[in-house]
Image (tube, rainbow, N blue to C red):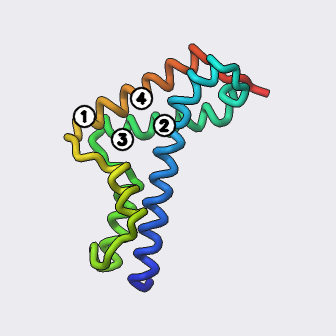
Amino acid sequence: MSPELLRAAASAVLYLHFAVVVFNVFWIVAIPLGAWRGWKFIRSFGWRLAHLIVMGVVALQALVGALCFLTLWQDALVRAAGGPAGETSLIERIVTRLIFWPIPLWAFVIIYVAAFAYALAMWWVVPPHRR
């Protein structure tokens, strides 16, 4: 595979990673806000289950000290393309800064486990409905 194609794949994984982060943050905010505002979509069983599973995977990875598989995948693609050579786009730099915070790994563990506990609590406080 050409370095350009590998870099493009690495960028695609970065954007996928960002979409997962946005998905998780959206539901963390939308569930209590939607319950208060009476939004019916926040009780969607499928979306809520997907959110809980993704949050669980993120928390479990943090607890066992594993890096996110999307981070590892992106890093592998960048390395296969020949490393960080070449300028990244402004959007990629912004997305990278939004996803990868310069804080200690133990802080991520606390954040991710707390976010999962919150999502789990919301399952009972604002229960989803099956159709």
Q: Residue at x 37, y 33 (%)?
A: 112
Q: List the residue tagged with mark 1.
A: 107
> Looking at the image, is 10 positioned above or below residue 50?
below
What's the CA distance linking mark 4 and mark 3? 13 Å
Q: Which residue is mark 3?
A: 61
Mark 1 / mark 4, whichever is N-terminal: 1
Q: Amino acid at mark 1?
A: Ala
| Quadrant of res 71 | bottom left
Q: Which mark sits nearer the N-terminus, 1 or 3?
A: 3
What residue is shown with label 2? 25
Vertical comparison of 12 with 71: above or below: below
Please provide percent x and percent y for residue 36. 62, 17
Q: Residue furthest top?
A: 125
Mark 4 against mark 3, which lies toward the viewer? 4
Say which of 89 and 104 sits in front.
Answer: 89
Q: Badge 2, how many Cα within 10 Å: few under 14, some, many 20+?
A: some
If the image is split into quadrants, where does the C terminus sit?
top right
Q: Give the mark nearer the N terminus: 4 vs 3.
A: 3
Q: Position of residue 73 (x, y in %)?
A: 39, 62
Cβ–Cβ under 8 Å for marks 2 and 1? no
User: Residue 86, image x and y in percent?
Assistant: 31, 79
Q: Is disc 2 placed on a helix, strand or loop?
A: helix
Q: Residue at x 46, y 71 (%)?
A: 9
- Of labels 2 and 3, the one closer to you: 2
The residues tagged by marks 1 and 4 sit, at their Cα atoms, a distance apart of: 12 Å
Disc 4 target residue = 115
Q: Is residue 112 above or below residue 35?
A: below
How far, Cα to Cα, is label 2 from label 3?
Answer: 18 Å
**Element type at mark 3:** helix
Q: Quadrant of the N terminus?
A: bottom left
At 37% from the left and 49% from the top, the residue drawn is 98
Do the residues bearing badges 1 and 4 touch, measured as CB atoms within 8 Å? no
